[in-house]
Image (cartoon, helix red, strand yellow):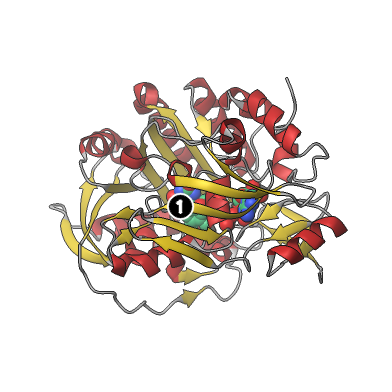
Amino acid sequence: MRWKTAEYSGWGRAVKAHGDIARPERVSALRTTLKEAAGPAIGNRRSYGDAALNGAGPVMDMTRLDRLIAFAPSSGILKAEAGAMVGDIARIFAPRGFAVPVLPGTGLATLGGCIANDVHGKSHHLVGSFGQHVHSIDLMGPSGRVRQITEKSHPELFRATIGGLGQTGIILAAELRLSEGGAPLLDVRESRADNLEEFMSMLEASSATYSVGWIDAAARGRQMGRGILEEGEYLPHSAPQRMKNRRSVPFDAPGFALSPPVVRLFNSAYFRRVPPEGRQRHRTLDDFFFPLDRIGHWNRLYGKAGFYQFQCVVPAVSARDSISQMMQRIARSGLASPLAVLKRLGAGRGGMMSFPMEGFTLAIDFANRPETPGLLHALEEVTLAAGGRIYLAKDALMRPDSALQMYDEQPDFARVANAADPGRVFETDLVRRLNLRSRT
Ligand SMILES: Cc1cc2nc3c(=O)[nH]c(=O)nc-3n(C[C@H](O)[C@H](O)[C@H](O)COP(=O)(O)OP(=O)(O)OC[C@H]3O[C@@H](n4cnc5c(N)ncnc54)[C@H](O)[C@@H]3O)c2cc1C
């Protein structure tokens, strides 16, 4: 196997690692590579922080192992290699009336990455997380031995692998249960919410299959927490549309690109784009589920220093108070970017380290400025006090104590991961930073 030595990062580009990267095309090559030098598997590095980094050794880039292996229309079960992109799978099966049951906000995440972070989508309140639709996983251990695991055959190992950040082994392939009713187009209703209370009530009252909110994180006073609720349903039998041309950000943007006056102006215009009475329109699957993928390298908008994403979930009972506290701090800081999402989550989670809990999730991007870590630590404290969690797929700054309090199944996870990988060759920077494999 030819190795490439490079500096690389997650999507946020604020934290980096330097090391050897192998990109095998066949399982046999992966096995040989593991024998040469073992390290964790990574997907398409759409995690924002250090989840897919290993500064202490090599990584196995799985994006070339991306074949679709088999599909049974009667059960909807698709078997695919771990490097297949979920957006490609969704696009291929939509015209056949099938849907990927859980899609994150980017189609450029791999099947393996979606399992290892147990990702959630716009229908989490109804269908739960990605891992809850995974039937089986082909898992390669540090010795190169492959086991097919299911919830029945290996209950603990399966629950430690879903959302398990690659710590139990390398996911080679998986069987995913597609749902019926997919289509290339969706019917989407957009409605304005004038403040946080109205927004949260609208999210709670929504009966749509897919719902997500854009929130104006720069608005203050009576407008604090205003935003736009999007509710979508697949349009059965709609015809595939031609993909719009993809634009790309050609270079790192200068510091003023996301300064507070620019963000306030942008957010006001974005909010007013939807008329007060709302609007309804048909949107393509890509446009609705992966709006940011239309702009290649959009992470360059934050400049060379990169950015952090803060994403928490807080329980429904305390959500009004805790999210309002966070929004006040964020608006006062002047650090927020226009990329901010408010969403309702259900209770569904497939693994020991899965993020979701019943409540509300808030996700906001912040340019990497000297004041940003302080703000994120303050938001971490509000999350902790509310009994919530920070999403490990997005994190780069959380303190280990907080992580261990938020993820109460961590001791079981550490036990199962340490048994599956006693030499700790699959540890990543995130896992070391947060001591996720320590036994307390
Ligand atoms: C624009 C955007 C929107 C997003 N929206 C959402 C959202 O709505 N919901 C959500 O939940 N997430 C969301 N995410 C996060 C993203 O879906 C997750 O971080 C996902 O895990 C990325 O997949 P990846 O293939 O890039 O994996 P990577 O980021 O490369 O890796 C993620 C983790 O998976 C492990 N891993 C990857 N492949 C394997 C494998 N084959 N075997 C074992 N372990 C493996 C890695 O070690 C690492 O721990 C979003 C990200 C972006 C950039």
- The quadrant of the picture occupied by the N terminus is bottom right
Secondary element type, mark 1: strand
Q: Which residue is mark 1?
A: 176
Neighbor class of circle 1 (other Cα within 10 Å; few <14, some 14-19, many 20+) is many
Where residue 65 sits, quadrant-wise, is: bottom right
Q: Is residue 337 left or right of residue 45?
A: left
Give the position of the C terminus as an image quadrant.
top right
Q: Is residue 373 above or below residue 281?
A: above
Please state which of residues 4 and 291 is positioned toward the viewer in this rendering: 4
Question: Residue drawn at (42%, 37%), measured in percent from left and top?
Answer: 361
Residue 429 position, x and y percent, is 74, 45
Residue 99 falls in image quadrant:
bottom left
| Residue with the most extreme left position | 277
Instruction: Pick the residue in front: 235 or 320.
Output: 235
Image spot of residue 296 (x, y percent): 51, 71
Taking the spot 51% from the left edge, 43% from the top edge, the residue there is 118
Residue 189 x/y as whole percent: 20, 55
Q: Is residue 298 left or right of residue 51?
A: left
Query: Residue at the spot x=38%, y=68% of the render?
Result: 91
